[in-house]
Amino acid sequence: MPLAKVAHFEGLKKIGKNVGRLTVVGGGMLAANASHAALDTTDAVAAITDAGTAITAVGVAILALAGLTLAIRWTKAQFF
């Protein structure tokens, strides 16, 4: 009887595939964990913080100009 026709052999092939996938995924997770341990993000965080400060300043200036424009239009409407 050929080994490929034995029902248990098919089940073992499926188990072998699952174990292989688990090994690949588990190994990938361990490698990713080890590679992330050496990252230094302080420069990136500082750059993002600086950009956020600049964006906030620009936003406040735009809102102030919009408020000034509305105040001028309202004042002009009161006289004309």
Image (cartoon, rainbow, N blue to C red):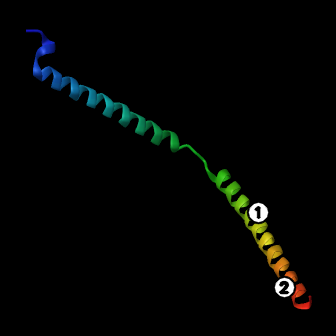
Q: Residue furthest front?
A: 80
Q: Residue 53 location in percent, x, y?
A: 73, 64
Please identify the quarter of the rendering in which residue 47 is found: bottom right
Q: Position of residue 35 (x, y in %)?
A: 51, 39
Q: Nearer the viewer, residue 32 or 64?
A: 64
Q: Amino acid at mark 2?
A: Trp
Q: In the figure, 57 relative to 35: above or below?
A: below
Which quadrant would the C terminus be assigned to in this image? Answer: bottom right
* Residue 54 drawn at (x, y percent): 76, 63
So how many labels did they put on this image?
2
Amino acid at dot 1: Ala
Q: Secondary structure at mark 2?
A: helix
Residue 30 in picture, x, y percent from top left = 41, 38
As drawn, the label of residue 74 is 2
Q: Nearer the viewer, residue 62 or 71?
A: 71
The residue located at (27%, 31%) in the rendering is 18
The residue nearer to you, when weighing 29 against 12, is 12
Residue under label 1, please give it.
54
Residue at horizontal 24 percent and vertical 26 percent from the top: 16
Picture layout, residue 66 above or below residue 36:
below
Nearest the viewer among 47 and 65 is 65
User: What residue is drawn where x is 73% and y is 67%?
Assistant: 56
Look at the image and tell me in which quarter the N terminus lies.
Answer: top left
Relative to residue 39, is residue 21 drawn left or right? left
Left or right relative to 64: residue 18 = left
Contact? badges 2 and 1 (CB < 8 Å): no
The residue that appears at 55% across and 43% down in the rendered structure is: 38
Q: CA distance from mark 2 to mark 1?
A: 30 Å
